[in-house]
């Protein structure tokens, strides 16, 4: 009997078909995976919004204001205490689209205690007093003002504002929490959105980066929580540079 086998041409055709299928399926799988992360991220912001509205209802509509911290993603221990006591957890403060910031990293969760990079959560106790002056590094920009008031208002158009109360003007159009979107320059064509040196770089050579990326290293957009409590997705093309350096977009 004559043995059947693939010819070289048939084998090449099969390989070509598989390559085409992979080229179609891989981007589709990436989009599905990223969409799932966007949903988790939006749920994080929704929980934060619920907690901040509960805080406001107990404090004459005022929002918790940082005593310490420098960057927009710094948040006081006391504020995170309240959010976790009203339904959140450590995962609530970290966008799943940022692989460099994870809720089990004590160096970020206890950033102002200046811990070694390999410190585990629970390895060093948190202070029990003066918790408002200690802060954590999260994956989100917090648009609340500080106790001493931020030095400058956000730049760009349309105009934005730092928020102190839930009774601000146009609460449905005022950003309260946004995904972190930042870069090394104001020109998106040449800027890096994945290797932004900041405080984590000077301590541990850990770059900061933008949360939601498309095409590998370009920002897709951001989830936005507004003062009135609703969430929305904002495309990067609708965002502007609001602070620098580094360059913060929302």
Image (spheres, rainbow, N blue to C red):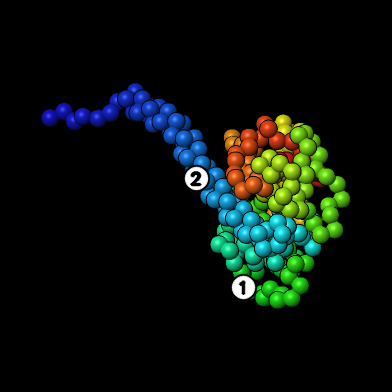
From the image, tell me which residue sits under label 1.
122
Rendering coords of residue 221 (x, y %) = 63, 38
Furthest residue to the left? 1
Q: Nearer the viewer, residue 30 or 224?
A: 224
- Label 1 sits on a secondary structure element that is loop
Residue at (76%, 41%) from the top-left corner? 160
* Left or right: 160, with 234 as reference point: right
Furthest residue to the top? 9
Furthest residue to the front? 60
Residue 198 vertical placement versus 9 (above, below):
below
Residue 213 vertical placement versus 70 (above, below):
above
Q: Nearer the viewer, residue 183 or 179?
A: 179
As measured in the structure, the alpha-carbon distance from the residue carrying label 1 to the one carrying label 2 is: 30 Å
Residue at (77%, 48%) from the top-left corner? 162
From the image, tell me which residue sits under label 2.
36
Residue 93 vertical placement versus 195 (above, below):
below
Rendering coords of residue 220 (x, y %) = 61, 36
């Amino acid at each position: 009997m004559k043995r059947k086998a693939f010819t070289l041409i048939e084998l090449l055709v099969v390989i070509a078909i598989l390559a085409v299928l992979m080229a179609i399926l891989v981007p589709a799988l990436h989009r599905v995976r990223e969409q799932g992360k966007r949903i988790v991220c939006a749920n994080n912001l929704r929980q934060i919004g619920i907690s901040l509205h509960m805080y406001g209802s107990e404090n004459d509509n005022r929002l918790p204001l940082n005593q310490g911290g420098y960057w927009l993603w710094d948040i006081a221990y006391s504020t995170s205490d309240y959010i976790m006591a009203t339904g959140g957890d450590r995962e609530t403060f970290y966008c799943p689209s940022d692989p460099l910031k994870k809720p089990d990293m004590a160096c970020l969760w206890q950033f102002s205690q200046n811990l070694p990079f390999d410190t585990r959560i629970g390895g060093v106790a948190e202070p029990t007093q003066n918790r408002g002056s200690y802060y954590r590094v999260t994956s989100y920009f917090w648009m609340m003002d500080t106790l001493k008031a931020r030095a400058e208002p956000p730049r760009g158009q349309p105009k934005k504002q730092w928020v102190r109360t839930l009774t601000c003007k146009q609460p449905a159009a005022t950003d309260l929490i946004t995904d972190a979107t930042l870069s090394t320059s104001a020109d998106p064509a040449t800027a890096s959105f994945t290797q932004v040196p900041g405080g984590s770089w000077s301590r541990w050579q850990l770059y900061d980066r933008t949360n939601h990326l498309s095409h590998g290293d370009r920002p897709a957009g951001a989830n936005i929580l507004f003062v009135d409590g609703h969430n929305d997705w904002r495309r990067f093309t609708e965002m502007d540079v609001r602070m620098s350096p580094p360059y913060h977009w929302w």
